[in-house]
Amino acid sequence: MDISTQKTTNEVTVFKDGDFVLYRAPELYWTGQSGHTFVCKVTKAWATGTYTLTALVSGRLVEFVKPDYMRLLPPIDAMRDIDTAPLHTDGAATDMTAAALAWLTRQHATANMPPELPAPRG
């Protein structure tokens, strides 16, 4: 097989509206400019196989993005600190947000409640 015809990229991922992705602007990257990689939300998936993204920090639209320059940011990565929080140690919760603490408190309370019995049949 000729080297020039070998597949050089990975299989293309299909993204959905609402997905969070890491986007690398190829023009900025290949010209050595800063700010070439940033987090976006997929706002539109086009039939042409390109996407419209919204940059999370600036709110700027990035159009006609090829999926080769996008990587999915899985929810499990965003939630890992909550899922693995060492709540049994002193000061462990100081780096967590109030919402994360409220969610964990609710999970703990629910997990420690005895199961409810069904209502008696009349």
Image (cartoon, rainbow, N blue to C red):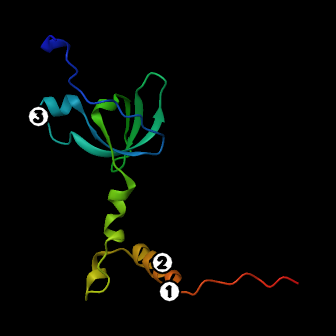
Contact check, label 3 and label 1, Cβ < 8 Å: no
Of 63 and 19, the residue lying toward us: 19
Instruction: Compute the Cα span from label 2 to label 1.
Output: 9 Å
Q: Secondary structure at mark 2?
A: helix
Q: Which dot, 2 or 1, sits closer to the camera?
A: 1
Residue lying farthest to the left in this orientation = 32
Q: Secondary structure at mark 1?
A: loop
Label 3 to label 1: alpha-carbon separation? 54 Å
Q: Which residue is mark 1?
A: 112
- Kind of residue at disc 3: Gly
Q: Residue at x 34, y 49 (%)?
A: 73
Q: Quadrant of residue 40?
A: top left
Counting from the top left corner in percent of width and height, residue 27 is at 21, 28
Q: CA distance from mark 2 to mark 3?
A: 47 Å
Residue at figure coordinates x 40%, y 73% from the top left: 100
- Residue ID at (27%, 45%): 38
**Residue type of the residue flagged with mark 1:** Asn
Q: For label 1, count other residues whose C-alpha is less than 10 Å away and answer few (under 14), some (14-19) or many (20+).
A: few
Vertically, is 90 above or below 71? below
Q: Which residue position holds label 2? A: 107
Residue 120 percent coordinates (x, y): 80, 85
Q: Residue furthest front?
A: 121
Please name the amino acid that badge 2 sits on. Answer: Gln
Q: Residues within 10 Å of mark 2 (few under 14, many from 20)?
A: few
Task: Name the N-terminal-most of marks 2 and 1.
Answer: 2
Dot 2 or dot 3: first in sequence order is 3
Vertical relation: 6 (above or below) 26: above
Q: Secondary structure at mark 3?
A: loop
Which numbered marker is on residue 32? 3
